[in-house]
Amino acid sequence: MGLLSDPVRRRALARLVLRLNAPLCVLSYVAGIAWFLALAFPPLTQRTYMSENAIGSTMVEEQFSGGDRARSFARDFAAHRRKTGALPVAWLERTMRSVGLEVYTQSFSRKLPFPDETHERYMVSGVNVYGILRAPRAASTESLVLTVPCGSDSTNSQAVGLLLALAAHFRGQIYWAKDIIFLVTEHDLLGTEAWLEAYHDVNVTGMQSSALQGRAGAIQVAVALELSSDVITSLDVAVEGLNGQLPNLDLLNLFQTFCQKGGLLCTLQGKLQPQDWTSVDRPLQSVQTLLLMVLQQASGRPHGPHGLFLRYRVEALTLRGINSFRQYKYDLVAVGKALEGMFRKLNHLLERLHQSFFFYLLPALSRFVSIGLYMPAAGFLLLVLGLKALELWMQLHEAGVGPQEAGGTAGSSPPFPPTQVTVPLLLLLGGLPLHLGWQVEGGSLGLPRPRGLSPSACVPCRVWGWPRLWRPC
């Protein structure tokens, strides 16, 4: 305490801090960047592993063989869509009923704050069609979702055909313990958000939609499917959701496991899985994949329909079929078998996915970086703000208080830091909760709260991967 109470020693300490502040800031910044780049190398990464015992084994025999039926459904869907110029709702209802599903529709409309990019319109309206396969061996308390988005620029007809073929195949099986919802949405994310809000009986975006006439159990897992052709060369997985949220790592591990079992090439950020980590090119590819994932998380936008499910505590991911110039190609049967295997394993879940990580970075599909390893990199970068704020405060303290200390009273206290000092500190403290596990669900987006709740009684947040949507905190 004598070092801080003695004015001479305090000024000497201040001069030392001011002299070393710039080198410390540079050192902290370089250390943060170096630590982040080192995360792509095997010593700081771990191999992915399955934490949930219920889905740990892939000893299931996939029996899906409806490739021709899926292509037939896809051709009919594309023809009816070209004829109507919109989502063929009547054809979808008729086809889903023919395979044995309970079919319902939902209409929605949304007034955009900006015109649509393709049609220069402010009002968007559409219809969602979904069918429910009831579990024959359990009550309707839990459910899984297979969804296909249909935008205005792409028909996604192959994905719709595969969805209908899988629905027909699943209808003939008797081992389902969860309801399965087959959802076809219009206008991509708008239709998905309208259906989710109606399903959970909330309205956080001002979407106008009709009430759902049919419901299943609580949704545990959702898989979104996007296919651009009858054959693919690889399946790319998207995991980044709204505000950087991520699904449970076990769901991603399950997808990779069945891709390996079926011989499918699976990619992350469009990059293939590195095979030889000892070569020079593989770590560089991992750094690129890691940077792409961080940039997509920083954008805050959902990179697929799955991103909207995450805000409702539904683990989800989006699978995109890529048809490139690679030699090996796979048909719809291979994709259907991978989806069948995933849904059969998810059917064994006794509770929500919770044992694996919710905060991670992926340099590759087979390796991950946990929150305990990438937090030091963020800490070093945030330390620069604290050091600069301390430097500004000491400079202003020396300029404003130093001349008065010689003749001032012993009980005088230094003034409070001004705005230019408190702002960096607030930025530093404001960034810590996001890195320590808090993910705000929409507080900065100006989303309206549900009717009947006061502002002090509800806070939309997601704490450690568990959402609390408009509930008292």
Image (spheres, rainbow, N blue to C red):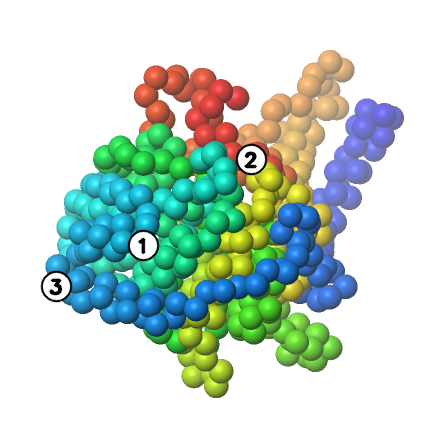
Q: Nearer the viewer, residue 342 or 133?
A: 133
Disc 3 secondary structure class: helix
Q: Which residue is mark 3?
A: 83
Residue 251 showing in the rendered view? no
> Is mark 2 in CB contact (under 8 Å) with mark 3?
no
Q: Quadrant of the N terminus?
A: top right
- Label 3 neighbour load within 10 Å: few <14, some 14-19, many 20+: few
Task: Find numbered disc 1 in the image and state the secondary structure of the residue it sits on.
Answer: loop
Task: Name the N-terminal-most of marks 1 and 2.
Answer: 1
Q: Position of residue 359 (x, y in %)?
A: 61, 47
**Along the polypeptide, which appears first: circle 1 or circle 3?**
3
Which residue type carries mark 2? Answer: Trp
Residue that appears at 36% across and 40% down = 196
Residue 381 image point, x, y percent? 64, 50
Q: Nearer the viewer, mark 1 or mark 2?
A: 1
Q: CA distance from mark 1 to mark 2?
A: 36 Å
- How many neighbours does mark 1 have within 10 angstroms: few (below 14), some (14-19), or many (20 or more)? some
Is label 2 in a helix, a strand or a loop? Answer: strand
Pinpoint residue 428: horizontal percent, then vertical percent.
59, 39
| Three-letter code, disc 3 | Lys
Q: Is residue 178 left or right of residue 190?
A: right
Q: Amino acid at mark 1?
A: Val
Residue placed most toward the observer, 86 or 453: 86
Q: Alpha-carbon neighbours of circle 2 within 10 Å: few (<14), some, or many (≥20)?
A: some
Residue at the limit of the structure toward the right, as seen here: 2
Residue labelled with disc 2: 466
In the rendering, at what x and y percent does residue 301 appear? Answer: 41, 50
Q: Earlier in the sequence, mark 2 or mark 3?
A: 3
**Residue at 19% over, 45% down:** 125
Question: Quick check: 363 above or below 346?
Answer: below
Q: Residue at x 77, y 64 (%)?
A: 43
